[in-house]
Amino acid sequence: MDNIISILIFVAVIGLTLGITYWAAKQTATASDFYTAGGSLTGWQNGMAIAGDYLSAASFLGIAGAISLNGFDGFYYSIGWLTAYLVVLFLIAEPLRNLGKFTMADMIGARFGAKKVRGAAALNTITIVLFYMLAQLVGAGALIKLLLGIDYWISVLIVGVMMTIYVLFGGMTATSWVQIVKAILLMIGTIVISFLVLLKFNFNFIGMFDAMRTATPHGEAFLHSGIIYKDPIGLISVLIALVLGTAGLPHILMRFFTVKDAKTARSSVIYAVWIIGIFYVLTIFLGFGAAKFVGVDAIIAENAAGNMAAPMLAGVLGGAALESFVAAVAFATILAVVAGLVLSGASAIAHDIYAEIIKKGKVTEKQQVRAARFAAIGVAVFSIILALGAEKLNVAFLVSLAFCIAASANVPTILLTIYWKKFNTTGAVASMLTGLIVALVLVALSPSVINPVEGAAFFVGEPIFPYANPAIISVPAGFLAAIIGTLVSSKRHEADEVSYAEVKFKAETGYRES
Amino acid sequence: MSKSSKKKQVKPTLDYEKIIDTPEFKNLVKRKKAFSTPYIIFFFVAFFTLPILTGYTNILEARAIGSMTWTWVYSLLMFVMVWLFTSIYMNKAKSFDRDVEEIVKKNVLK
């Protein structure tokens, strides 16, 4: 019986999103439709879509689980991922919208025309998308397997086929509306669970903290920092990745091209910040509620990382119907995020690499859309194959790696392209590649890969680099490479560079020649 | 517009060097910077002060209200800060929009 409710709700989510895709497909004709929904979204629509694109399984299932198992340390993710939007709003959103067209690389390419700059930006986009997508697909596979009892590989295939259909036929229009619907479902689910948790605590917010002092094996420490993050440097390193990484995530940056101008881009951030902020505050109720009413042992028994805490809590508080609904919300959450990822990966391949680098911009509208569709299939198939072989991979590790690469490899170049007059082609390429390589190498040497505890990582042994997240080294390395690269090559002037005066004027005003 | 087609234009349509040197444009950039910089410094400092306080001291572990420690109060204030700063930014940005419009009108649409 429970299973029937679950299956019905899952089918409803699939049906609704396919309906959206069918409708969106009819309005997707040009490259601009495909990549950016023709820039037609309003501020609130894009704000909801940003929230839908951003709040991944790591936020919904991951943070709820992390707070329930590790108390305050789980909440650092909520704080970091929200504060990140101040970086996006104050430093990046408007100039990005003013300079770019379809992709993050367009924005950097508006100043540096050299193929190697666009190539490096596209490489970073593809790397980040793959890690992030792998995390979502592995998470989705595990989730559906647990909820519906379907094999892991079938679960991955279902999600993989769905995301491919959305992007292939409906492009950015379908992706955006799937994300908007998901944001609404996620907020409803989270608010209902939070309300029920508060009800259990007699609407006494402070009383809830009293209860949590004795609700878990951690005792009073549950309410303090330090259960996981015993080393402050390791904690600061994680927080650097969280607060800066968002500003370098290609699928989030791409969302700013779906609105008509910088003013709308700005207003979409405001809507997104309210939705995302309310959601992250509510993660307190999800985490506390799960720890208190489901119990740490039961949560760990289901999934060691705590990923099932939120659906289990829904089951305890609202019965099988609510649990099924929340499971469907989690499913929709993953679908919306992977669709955004497929689209941004496809845009890096079809727009940046094929249309701009190989064809030097000489492609017809039809060729562009066709290339984008092929690229979408390519990205989807490749990541499904990776995900099929990665069932045992730790999801949180993959997501934090994606944030770290975004913060180290993309953010320095994005900021300096807008704000540093002397910045040049060599500096940009040096920064993007250094950030990427340093982040990857340090992670390969970190406890996430080499761990003394057997089964905790790929190899057993002492890690060479002590911190799981290397942002504290790799982000400064990205900036340093930008500065050194620029200074050692300042005498040379690349023919493809657009004057800073032009970039500055366009970034500030949104003026375009055409 | 693609890079390669841009390169073919022998002369840029506008004298950007001259425009960004006008007092209006310089003033706009200066005002934006003067507005944003304190907020940016403040939120970065506020954000990284949290792990420094929780990592190196115990002062946030004291109870603030009931069993809710200062760690939580500080964290919730971070949320308030984000909402407040986005609203302030939104309001202030409107005044920059007007300046931008005037600059574009004056220099581009002659």
Image: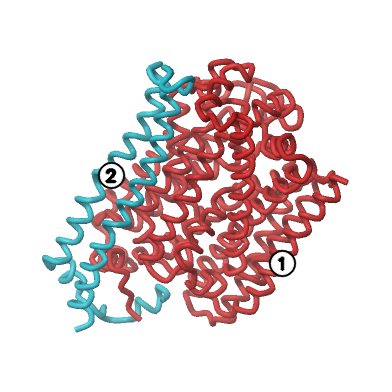
Chain colours: A red, B cyan
Question: Which residue shows up at 41% across the image and 62% down it?
Answer: A265
Q: Name the chain under label 2.
A: B
The residue sitting at 41% across, 17% down in the picture is B62
* In the image, residue A326 above or below residue B102: above
Given residues A441 and A313, the one toward you in this image is A313
Looking at the image, which is closer to me, A490 or A119? A119
Residue A109: tell me if it is visible: no
Residue assigned mark 1: A18
Q: Decide which of A489, A397 is in the foreground and name it.
A: A397
Q: Residues within 10 Å of mark 1 (few under 14, many from 20)?
A: some
In the rendering, at what x and y percent does residue A51 appear? 53, 53
Q: Secondary structure at mark 2?
A: helix
Q: Amino acid at mark 2?
A: Tyr
**Can residue A480 be seen?**
yes
Instruction: Please name the residue shown 22% across and 79% down the image.
Output: B108
Q: In this image, B5 relative to B108: left or right?
A: right
Residue found at x 58% / y 25%: A70
- Farthest left residue? B23
Give percent across and percent down for residue A503. 29, 65
Amino acid identity at mark 1? Leu
Vertical placement of residue A324 versus A295, above or below: below
Up-down relation of residue A416 to residue A473 (above or below): below
Cα distance between the residues tagged 2 and 1: 43 Å
Q: Between A441 and A343, which is closer to the camera in this rendering?
A: A343
Neighbour tally class for label 2: few under 14, some 14-19, many 20 plus, Cα within 10 Å: some
User: As drawn, is A375 to the left or to the right of A484?
Assistant: right
* Chain under callout 1: A
Label placed on residue B39: 2
